Image (spheres, rainbow, N blue to C red):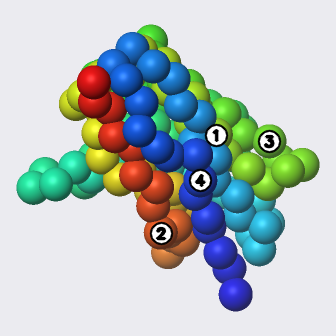
Amino acid sequence: QVQVVESGGGLVHPGGFLRLSCVAPGLTFSIYAFDWYRQAPGKERELVASITSAGERNYVDSVKGRFTISRDNVKKTVYLSMNNLKPEDTAVYHCHGVRRGADWSSPGYWGQGTQVTVSS
């Protein structure tokens, strides 16, 4: 059974740092694109960052310059490094693995999520 498992969340002060990890040992990892989504209570789920199989990265404007998405195909792990965290970054963060082409995408695989809380 394919699994996508996140870790690395926690409680951090404003201005702090966290690195989230997403391991997907059951996937043919290198051909998958990965997304990090987040959902705060009472809010819509938001796409935060994406990385393609070729390593191209995209970010939502609110995290540009603070968050970095990266991947290690050998370890089958995707990372989200989050600097200068703000209270509005508080949410459950989910990893999503998907195969994408120019005009198609496969059904994706979701992890259970990891809680990030930014508070003084």
Residue 57 x/y as whole percent: 56, 30
Packing grade of label 4 (10 A; few <14, some 14-19, many >=20) is some
Vertical arrangement, residue 4 with respect to residue 47, above or below: below
Q: Do residues under tags 3 and 1 come within 8 Å of each other at their CB atoms? A: yes
Residue on which the image places disc 4 = 7
Looking at marks 2 and 4 on the same chain, the residue that comes earlier in the sequence is marked by 4
* Amino acid type of the residue that numbered disc 4 sits on in the rendered structure: Ser
The residue labelled by disc 2 is 112
Q: Secondary structure at mark 3?
A: strand
Indicate the secondary structure of the residue bearing disc 2: loop
Tell me the quadrant of the picture where the C terminus can be found. top left
Question: Which residue in the protein does label 3 denote?
Answer: 72
Residue that numbered label 1 is attached to: 79
Extreme residue toward the right, this view: 74
List x then y, in percent, for residue 80.
56, 36
User: Residue 61, relative to residue 104: is it above or below?
Assistant: above
Which is more N-terminal, label 4 or label 1? 4
Amino acid beneath label 2: Gln
The picture quadrant where one finds residue 101 is bottom right
Which residue is pictured at 45% across the width and 19% down the height? 16
Left or right placement of residue 37 versus residue 69 in this view: left
Q: Nearer the viewer, mark 1 or mark 4?
A: 4
Extreme residue toward the bottom, this view:
1
